[in-house]
Image: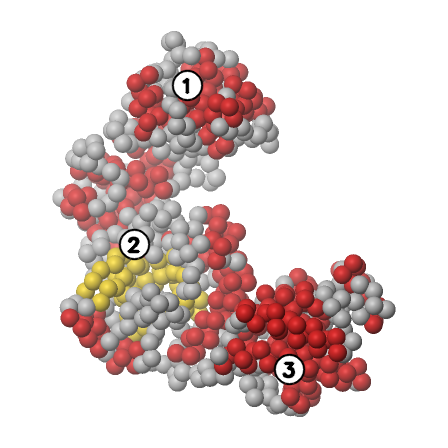
Amino acid sequence: MADEMVRSAQRFVNTVYGENKIGMKVEEDGKTGWQLMYALTRALQYELGITDLSNNFGPTTLSTLEATWPSIGFRDTPANVTMIIQSALYAKGYDGSGINGVYDERTEAAVALMKRRMGVTAAFPGSDLVPKVFKALLTMDAYVVVNNGSDTVREIQQWLNGRYIGRRDFFVMPCDGHFSRDVAKSMVYAVQYEIGMADGVADGWFGNQTEAGLAEHVLSVGAVGNWVRLFSAAMMFNQRFDAFTTAFESTLATAVRSFQRFAALEETGKADVRTWASLLVSYGDQDRKGGACDGVTRITNARAATLKAEGITIVGRYLTPGGSSLPEKQIQSGELDTIVFNGLRCFPIYQTWNRSVDDFYYGAGVHAALAAIDWAKFYGFRNGTTIYFAVDYDAVDWEVTEYIIPHFKGVFRAIGENSSYNVGIYGPRNVCQRVHNQGYAVTSFVSDMSSGFSGNLGYPLPSNWAFDQIVTKWVGSGDGRIEIDVDIVSGRDEGQDSFDPPLDPTGLDTDFDDSYHDAALKDVQDYLVSIGVPETGGDEWNDDDWATIGGISTTEAFDSVIRMDPLFTDLARVLRVRKALVQAPVLWELRKWNPLDKFADDAVKDGDRDDSSTGWGQIFAATAIKARNYCIDQGIINGSRLTDADMASVWTRLHEDPIYNITTAAYVTLWDAAEIGVARPGLNTSDSDSQAILARYNGTGDGAEKYGRELIGLYQVLEQYNGTIRTS
């Protein structure tokens, strides 16, 4: 909702400064936000004579402000600077006195109110604006409880501000009732100050000196004072206690034991150094011995002996290759036998790249799941194994919502439908917890040694953690020397110590090689022309060009199928069928789509029909239900049997979700084979059986027979290239 005074602030910064002076202009929409704060920050820098303008209120801006106007109030402050202050007050929801350029009583009252809410009035009494408060003013931080925040957390935030704001590197934190990255770092500063670190030594990062200082401040029942305040605050921020107190009483000791048990620490009931560390920084005490490790190096007998000497019994290894730079990242031939022989267990990790937001979306999740199933079966991982899918970057909260959760929805659905494996997640704390909250991961493998990740700072250890990755180090010597990531173990996943015979991948289809694109397209075009299907149009519409009325050309249909090749490949490998058997009908139906199909779909949407053939593979919902139920009954896929009551939801998914439609097309081919009494299609199904299966895809009768004759030729063209690629 627009605010007219915020609009006035935007107009002020554009009119007085704008692109000519500060290099930016803000939209005058009356809505507060970071763009306005950035513009006001640049305007202040301009007034201070700083030439290298920045959105960041950094050390140069602060020191120049301290030297120029150490305290702003009823003094000779330029009107423009006062209007910057008043504009920022309106942007933060305070009365800016009309942006009149005079630091008057209303401006004074607003600044005084803001300082009270910050908790800094003892350090900065009165109504003057000092540089550290000015810096805080030019942020979007709130100083009242927002979005269901906690009043007690706000009380802690205000106390921290009030007690430590006088220290050089401590700045005003938000007082909004929420634990956050800034609050987490401020807590470390507070501990360092209480230890006695000087300004310039205290840096807000948890290291050896901080840990050594905490070792001298072990707290137990009966302790009182500010150290107890800090410890109870740390417990609260980790959601393990519900009071901010100066007295270490039995209730706090009980909560500490509960936390220590949860975090796999020794249950002392005391605020000992390892408990402090686990509360203050994601990796905790990195000298802890972990019961598990993960790594990119093959486990040999000598290395297994090293791991056992370190107290490690579980090893995380990767299902996928690591390229030439990491030749042993993937589980090596015979390695699982070595792991078991040496009394170790193994948990599998699936990661291809997964280090950018662009790697995460629903379709990529489906692909990852099906590929992981294929690899896990290749190595013989048994039903019930948890596969950890990686989120190996610092995903911020909105990216988790928009990309990571849809990705894991795809993973979860594909794993659940096509295997008896479980889904785990590797990633920062916030990512792991949010995916678990959605029900898409049973356990978490937490990347806690990335302590600077925004998804780790300010978030507690996920409730379903199985492995907690805390440090990378070298262990052992000679042939047994190995670099590992040390993982603390919760007991939620013990890994696997026995394996099924691996499935033979010989003869399975592989991903399409783009170097064959033009030749394959030409052969598909030539074949379709030979049976009366030109690049566009066709005899059904008197050679009208369908492209002008919404039709799809041969090139468009072919390229659509190639674009979805990873899915076709995954399905073919998991189901052990020829990829072309699914590609052929989907490509054909895309090419032959016409306005009658749209009319039929619209009739279903309008409620005039119950069903129509729809989507990429032009599948009826009734057919999808029969095919999926057949596959469920045969144990090919998992799930609950569908009924006519599911007709509408199945049709909608077929119509809107190409992945669901193509997956269903694969299941239809299996059901078709059973319907006509031929063997389930496999890697060596004859052309005659394939033709019969393809004919049944279109129904029964003369039209279906013609369909089968036409599609077997298309199947053979596609299979020619698939065969060449898989054997090359």
Measuring from the top left, give residue 28's x and y in whole percent: 58, 27
In the image, what residue occupies the spot 46% across and 48% down? Answer: 397
Q: CA distance from mark 2 to mark 3?
A: 52 Å
Q: Amino acid at mark 3?
A: Gln
CA distance for labels 1 and 2 = 43 Å
Q: Report which residue position mark 2 lands on.
A: 449
Query: Hey, what amino acid is under mark 2?
Result: Met
Closer to us: mark 2 or mark 3? 3
Residue 438 in sight: no
Q: How is the image coloured?
A: secondary structure
Q: Which element carries disc 1, helix, strand or loop? A: helix
Label 3 – label 1 distance at C-alpha: 74 Å
Q: Does residue 96 sit above or below 340 in this rendering?
A: above
Give x and y (percent) for residue 592: 75, 70
* Residue 583 found in image quarter: bottom right
Residue at left 15%, top 70%? Answer: 478
In the image shown, does 658 or 245 lie closer to the viewer? 658
Which residue is label 1 attached to?
47
Which tag is nearer the camera, tag 3 or tag 1? 3
In the foreground, 190 or 592? 592
350 lies above or below 666: above
Residue 529, x across and y down, in percent: 75, 75
Q: Helix, strand, or loop for circle 2?
A: loop
Amino acid at pointer 1? Glu
Q: Residue at x 68, y 66 (%)?
A: 555
